[in-house]
Amino acid sequence: MKALVVENLSKNFDGLQALDNISFSVEKGERLAIIGPNGAGKTTLFQLINGIIPPSSGKIFLFGKDITKLSTYQRASLGIGRTFQITNLFSNLTVFDNVLLALEAFNFTRFNIFYPAYSYKKLVSKAEEILNEWNLLEKKDDLVKNLSYGEQRKLEIILTLSQNRSLLLLDEPTCGLSFDESKNFVSMIRSFSREYTILLIDHDLDVTFEIAEKVMVLHFGRIIAYGNPEEVRNNPKVQQIYTGEER
Amino acid sequence: MREPKYNLKFIIGIAILLSLLVLLPLFLPSYYIGLFSLMLIFAIFSMSLDILQGYTGLPSLGHAAFLGIAAYIVGLLNVKVFKGCNFGIELVAGILSAAIVACILGLIVLRSKDVYLLMILLASSMMLWGIAFKWRSLTGGDDGLPGIARPDLSFIHWNLGNTIHFYYFVLLFFIVSGILMYLIVNSSFGHILMGIRESEIRMQSLGYNTWLQKYIAFIISGIFAGISGILLAYYNGFVSPSEFHLVTSAEGLIMVILGGVGTLIGPAIGAVIIILIKNFISAYTEHWMIILGLIYIFTVIFAPEGIYRIFKKLLER
Amino acid sequence: MIFFINQIINGFVFGMLLFLLAAGLTLMLGIMRIINLAHGSYYLLGGYIGFSIAKYTNSFFFACLGGLLSIGILGIFSYKIILEKHFTREPLAQVLVTFGMLLIISDLCRWIWGGTPLAIPKPEILQGNINLGKIVVPVYRLAVIILGGMILIFLWWFQERTKYGAIVRAGVDDDEMTEGIGINISFVKTIIFGIGALLAGFAGVVGGPFVGLSIGLDIEILLLAIVVVVIGGMGSLKGAFCGALLIGLIDSFGKSLLPELSIFTIFATMFIVLAIKPSGLFGIK
């Protein structure tokens, strides 16, 4: 069964056609990279799949189910997880609280209006475990707004991955990470099982081509190329767009 | 492991504060005790607003709607129906009225954001003001509804006509409300509210039905504001349309900001300060409004994060 | 029929007054994103200052000038010294500060001019009535309507046709961009705020003869101005004008036909607009 099917999806912002009649599908377990110059519509595509903005026309199917009219939180519970290109964290809360919120979401503790989340030991230890894996444990009581940009970017990824969503929309995940951290990130993603389907936007073409099994190229809101990495790399139209483009 | 809110210093501090409040009548004359009743009533009001504004991030200039509706329901039942106080029914009716207004209003307004939310809540409260002001036959209009009797607690030997007894009556409500609100903001739910305040989109992407959480917060906040309205009706012995007016909402908001948005205790402190100044300073000069105004301006310039946070920072030295 | 026309005229007159207030407020709220709760206080203070000037100089003209200039200066001063430095983006702080100013000005007014309601006498040339067919209209009220129209035209011209207006329209939202092309955004914002305040003060004097000056008027008129701005659309002069006339009419008809519901109706209209089309009749966004 296909994890994601996008059918004739368009988005028009007051005259600006951000996405123009896009159709594609993603198999379960597949790693699809979406590349294209700035303004091509990549993040807009994610916003539409995620449910943050409604399409002007078209449909989206998640694991066979039509989610076009569903709201963002409903799509999240159906399995969509997303990281944001512009860091979207809870700045005035601590690192620990940020992770806890991600973990609580699909956990019944959140219906409690009298007990704090800290009293749920399982959640707490899971949060500590995750932070430890990413080397952020010592900073767990720091406010997010006081973290460095790179640390915030790491946390951005952590929040999403900690939820074990089956369709991951990763928007510029390595942006802000050091060379080593990027490498670690790539091997981590490569080690994910086929239970996870991944859509990746990343300006770093090395990262992109190491993870991607299929690549889709967007330009001015249209798909101008789609195929496996080799095909796309050798596609003259794609090369033309990227000539002079900084890596 | 991190448990910031329940640490020992804090609990001791609160315990001392509460003891002081309980022992207050021993060393203050009854005029001030009466004033403290008013302070505690508005502390409940401002804390309830903080849940909405400080924790959930929903700005409001219409919180008086809940205080007013509960106060008027108590007044109407007391003066027109029971011709005396039927505390049980008045209490339940007051709380229920605030809850119902919140339920209905919440369905309409929670789609709005920022300035628009601020304004639509302002409009809501002023609509109620318009009704209270003009529907003379029911509400007494501008003159208000005088003659509200206090509850008869003679079965526990309390005479609420006595300032000190009434003070303990209010103090009881304050402590219970305070504890409940405190537990709520420090619970998972409170946490979620803060997440919504910081980034609603992120919360939605993480799977939270943020509208529902906001709705619940709105109702809870409204209920506690209603409680302050009920107590105010008994305190004053009458209700008037000003209970619904922008000025009341604005004062509540000011108490929150002055004390410290999102700290719960800060707004309570803010309430105490403002009521104190209004009543205390007015004994010495009729120009207390200028003084209050200057305090607001200086607070914003020199202590924008609120008095409570400054106090905490000083303590940490 | 006569009654009907009289109500319309009264509604328009009051509407023009509201327009003067709302014009400034809509720019402050809609474009500069500043919540100025002291706007009604500007009206009142301007009116009182005008009253005193009229009393001592017997000149309505100087009263207007005085009211307008003094509040304009007050506005510039408030903005530069207090508002700009400390919270251009913090709405809560603005509420606190401007409410503080409201209290201070309100107290000052009571201190200096006392608690009894006052009225500014109409200027001689505008006294008396005009007969338009069967309708008797005070000359002064007609003058106010004409004045309102003139100010609308002037403001519209300023906004649509001048360089500064273009800056207002385009630049105030994006400070960095505007400064990047060499425009002193702080100066522009100060001027806008000053003009808004000036109009409010001027309105206070103009309204002096028929609305009068009294305690509590600052809040009353602030609320109406807010309603107008919301209904018309924040940031829209056209909206401020139409909204002001609408509220003026509702107020006028409401008071005479449905006094019990007039206040409720005004706020209910604001509520409905916000619930259905928050950007108001002509607002941006």
Image (cartoon, rainbow, N blue to C red):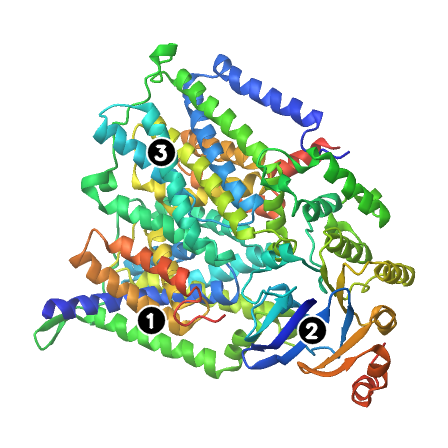
Q: Nearer the viewer, mark 2 or mark 1?
A: 2
Q: Are marks 2 and 1 in contact (CB under 8 Å)?
A: no
Asked which quadrant contains residue B280, the reply is top left
The residue at the point 32 percent across, 50 percent down is B127
Q: Which residue is mark 1?
A: C242
Q: Amino acid at mark 3?
A: Gly
Q: Amino acid at mark 1?
A: Cys
Above or below residue C174? Residue B93 is above
The single residue placed furthest to the right in the displayed view is A180
Image coordinates for residue C44, horizontal then vertical, percent: 35, 55
Mark 2 — on which chain does it sit?
A
Above or below residue B308? Residue B17 is above
- Between the C-alphas of marks 3 and 1, the distance is 40 Å
Image coordinates for residue A35, horizontal then vertical, percent: 77, 76
Q: Nearer the viewer, residue C45 or C281?
A: C281
Image coordinates for residue B87, horizontal then vertical, percent: 33, 24
